[in-house]
Amino acid sequence: MTTSFDWSLPRGTLIRGKWKQGAYRVEKPLGEGANGKVFLVERQRYLYALKLGADAVDLQSEVNVLQAIAGQKRRLGSKSGAFLVDVDDYQAADGKDYPFYVMRYIKGMTLGDYLERQGKEWLPVVGFHLLGKLAELHEAGWAFGDLKVENVIVEDYGRPELVDYGGATAFGKGVRQFTEIYDRGYWNAGSRTADAGYDLFSFAVLCVQLYEGRRLAQLSAGLLPQTRTQEELAKLAATSPQLKPLSGWLRKAFYGEFRNAREAAASWQQWMHRPNRERGHAGAPAPRWMKGLFALSAAVLATTVYWLLRSGL
């Protein structure tokens, strides 16, 4: 795994692209990944997120992912704004060139913080949207890899975005970065080869983490490496009052029984449409406006599936 890029930039620092001459003024640091640092920057009164790294090859892999997603959206006729804004090199005071890319700035909070503030009843809607994001990525030929609570930022009205694409890996290759407790290989539930099932497994662990984080940590610490299995995770979900209504869906994700993220999203949608008494706590009654938002999301998903089938993807 690449060593973190340990370099800070004070507020007001001007990052100017060596080749395209785009100028970005640093406002503050936003976070640090395994292969670079992310800064909030301003250009012409607009805010962006700029990721600066030390290794051009390493950072280029993330750029390739974002470009692939953008191409997928164009093929499907999506009118959503571009996520990737600029790619260039920054020539620093030490004379060295540091690669960077600029993304649309996502103003929100981590998934855990969002559900803590807005309520766990938001999980059905946020989860559905997140499965859609994973499906877009998978249909472009990539697995996200390092899916965890911290790498999901939620904007207003439960709209999630994936951040830190340092672990994104082309299907069929070994996952570049991962966090052990979310990792399929850690639980002896499959390989670390990038595929849709790898991300769906991590998504299921993420659900458990949100509701039963303490029990999950205890389970992980209490098992020997050779005794960690997806069955232990499935049992934990089935014995959780909050997760029991969702335990059937989680079991399928733990055992890799979904063909792809679209199928997983459709199954999630079916769970959401069950009567409240069947959904239980994890699917607590949603406000009327949230149901309308979900109906719109379902329509978007149906349209996307239609165009995928029509285009032969």
Image (cartoon, rainbow, N blue to C red):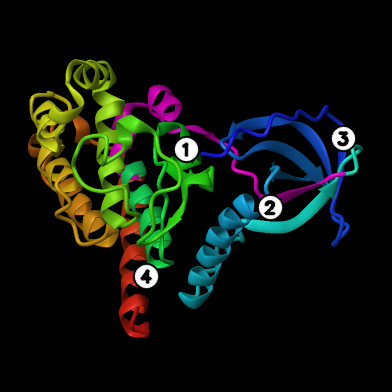
* Residue 92 in picture, x, y percent from top left: 87, 41
Query: Where is residue 136, by image quadrant?
Result: bottom left
Given contact means CB atoms under 8 Å apart, are the residues at marks 3 and 1 in contact? no
- The quadrant of the rendering that contains the C terminus is bottom left
- Crowding near the residue tagged with mark 3, few <14, some 14–19, many ≥20 C-alpha atoms within 10 Å: few
Q: Nearer the viewer, residue 84 or 159?
A: 84
* Residue 154 in picture, x, y percent from top left: 47, 38
Which of the labelled discs sits on residue 13, or is there none?
A: 3
Tag 4: residue type?
A: Thr
The kind of secondary structure element at disc 3 is: loop
- State which region is magenta: 96-125
User: Is 111 included in the stretch rendered in magenta?
Assistant: yes
**What residue sits right under mark 4 in the picture?**
304
* Residue 246 in picture, x, y percent from top left: 15, 38
- Crowding near the residue tagged with mark 1, few <14, some 14–19, many ≥20 C-alpha atoms within 10 Å: some
Tag 1: residue type?
A: Asn
Q: Is residue 152 left or right of residue 51?
A: left
